[in-house]
Image (spheres, grey):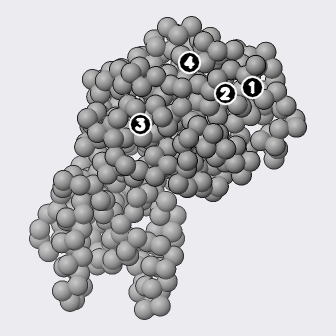
């Protein structure tokens, strides 16, 4: 008789969210990150998991950043766009919309050359633009975020893949960047439409230095071949307690670990609380690099990130592996969690990226569309543990299916290695 599908406990998830909110900000290299690391190691060991350990890795830290953005003598509130050049630059501003292919085509059709200029653009993921911005030879980048309440968010100018050793090729980027809020963005765009060129002056003063971070790893043994990886990053962006991103993933990881420690499954399950995700997916990439041989028998990787909040949001499944996306879709529907979108595409914005690129089918099941993403407004009051438990329970049910299917070689998820 099959075991019932796992359902995660919202009360336990809520208590963990409270604990993480009390720890506060967990930006890479901060005291909060170290406290969260020790908290996770203690919690995982307390669940009776095996081989609970810290795995150290090196990364290029970004700290002490101060940024300025001046337009027509007026200074706009801004944050440094992490991993852009620490320098002062100025240039004529060019508005690029959302920096889509059609936006570039519009400028190209008008003969607009952005080389040596300051590009202004809206983007949820500014790091995805860096390759083309480098190719176009810009001097600076003003990223406009959409965070409510006049809050300016914190974002990275470059993310994945990160360099894993000196000389840290590609970090920092050759251009300087800042993030401004949407109110300042509207004012800047209005200035640009008033006629004549507009000069924007940017300053970015950051310290980049080699540093050490630690992934927290624990395992549940299994008798069968193969294993399943479950991952959630425990670091945060630079301001606020960051409860949605990614306290929800950490709380879900711990509740999955507790739930599966009380169930038997043929396959081994490896739990990873990764570090330095927000600034480059460094922890997950380092884990993949260090464990490449062992990952040959990994059936799948499930990423727990930005699971859900108190806000209405679409239910989404992301996986570059069509077979895993299909299995996740069927699992979700069987639990009454009907996805609004199933995205069978490669994505680079989270810890599933390095696993997928290493040949491990990877999946993210989440509810995005959170207005305080990557900002100090991401607080405990805006996260509903019931919504988190419902969404994370779909991931738990998928983990359960993957851990119980003993057909390693015949399993379509294990192809393409």
Asked whether disc 1 touches disc 2, contact meaning CB atoms under 8 Å apart, the reply is yes
Element marked by disc 3: helix
Answer with mark 4 or mark 1, whichever residue precedes in sequence: 4
Q: Please, which residue is most extreme toward the right here?
A: 410
Q: Residues within 10 Å of mark 1 (few under 14, many from 20)?
A: some
The earlier-in-sequence mark between 3 and 1 is: 3
Dot 2 or dot 3: first in sequence order is 3
Q: Where is residue 149 shown, x and y percent of the image?
A: 18, 53
Give how far across and how far down residue 147 sits, in percent: 27, 55
Q: Measured from the top left, where is residue 354 in percent x and y?
A: 62, 43
- Which tag, 4 or 3, sits closer to the chain's start? 4
Q: Quadrant of the C terminus?
A: top right
In screen coordinates, is 175 left or right of 147?
right
* Residue at x 70% of width, y 31% of height: 401
In this orientation, which residue lies closer to the viewer: 67 or 236? 236
Q: Earlier in the sequence, mark 2 or mark 4?
A: 4
Label 4 to label 1, Cα distance in Å? 15 Å
Work out how far the residue at label 4 is from the one at label 3, CA to CA, in angstroms: 18 Å
- The residue under label 2 is 400
The residue that mark 4 highlights is: 259
Q: At numbered mark 2, what does the secondary structure look like: helix, strand or loop?
A: helix
Q: Are marks 2 and 3 in contact (CB under 8 Å)?
A: no
Residue underneath mark 1 = 404
The residue sitting at the bottom extreme is 110
Pointer 4 and pointer 3: residues touching (CB < 8 Å)?
Answer: no
| In this picture, residue 256 sits left or right of residue 251 | right
Point 35% across, 66% down: residue: 122
Q: In which quadrant of the rendered image does the N terminus lie?
A: top right
Q: Which residue is mark 3?
A: 387
Residue at the spot 73% in from the left edge and 44% down from the top edge? 359
User: How many dots with numbers?
Assistant: 4
Residue furthest to the left in view is 73
């Amino acid at each position: 008789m099959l075991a019932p599908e796992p359902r995660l406990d919202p009360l336990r998830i809520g208590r963990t969210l409270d604990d993480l909110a009390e720890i506060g900000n967990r930006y890479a290299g901060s005291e909060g990150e170290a406290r969260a690391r020790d908290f996770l190691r203690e919690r995982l060991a307390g669940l009776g998991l095996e081989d609970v350990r810290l795995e150290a890795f090196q990364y290029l830290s970004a700290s002490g950043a101060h940024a300025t953005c001046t337009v027509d003598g007026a200074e706009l509130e801004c944050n440094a766009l992490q991993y852009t050049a620490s320098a002062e630059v100025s240039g004529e501003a060019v508005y690029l919309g959302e920096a889509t292919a059609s936006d570039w085509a519009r400028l190209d059709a008008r003969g607009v050359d952005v080389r040596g200029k300051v590009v202004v653009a809206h983007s949820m993921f500014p790091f995805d633009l860096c390759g083309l911005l480098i190719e176009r030879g810009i001097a600076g980048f003003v990223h406009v975020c959409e965070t409510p309440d006049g809050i300016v968010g914190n974002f990275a100018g470059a993310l994945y893949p990160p360099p894993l050793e000196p000389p840290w090729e590609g970090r920092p980027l050759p251009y300087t960047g800042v993030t401004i809020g949407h109110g300042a963005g509207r004012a800047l765009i209005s200035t640009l439409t008033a006629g004549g060129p507009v000069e924007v002056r940017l300053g970015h003063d950051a310290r980049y230095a080699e540093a050490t971070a630690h992934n927290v790893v624990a395992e549940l043994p299994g008798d069968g071949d193969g294993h399943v990886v479950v991952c959630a990053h425990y670091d945060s962006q630079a301001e606020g307690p960051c409860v949605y991103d990614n306290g929800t993933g950490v709380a879900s990881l711990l509740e999955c670990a507790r739930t599966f420690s009380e169930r038997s499954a043929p396959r081994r399950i490896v739990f990873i609380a990764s570090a330095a995700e927000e600034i480059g997916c460094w922890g997950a990439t380092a884990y993949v690099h260090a464990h490449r041989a062992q990952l040959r028998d990994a059936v799948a990787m499930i990423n727990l990130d930005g699971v859900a909040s108190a806000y209405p949001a679409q239910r989404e499944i992301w996986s570059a592996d069509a077979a895993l996306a299909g299995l996740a879709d069927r699992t979700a529907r069987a639990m009454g969690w009907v996805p609004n979108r199933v995205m069978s595409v490669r994505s680079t914005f989270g810890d599933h990226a390095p696993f997928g690129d290493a040949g491990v089918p990877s999946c993210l099941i989440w509810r995005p569309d959170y207005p305080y993403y990557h900002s100090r407004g991401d607080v405990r009051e805006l996260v509903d543990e019931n919504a988190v438990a419902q969404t994370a329970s779909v991931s738990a049910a998928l983990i359960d299916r993957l851990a119980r299917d003993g057909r390693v070689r015949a399993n379509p998820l294990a192809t393409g290695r």
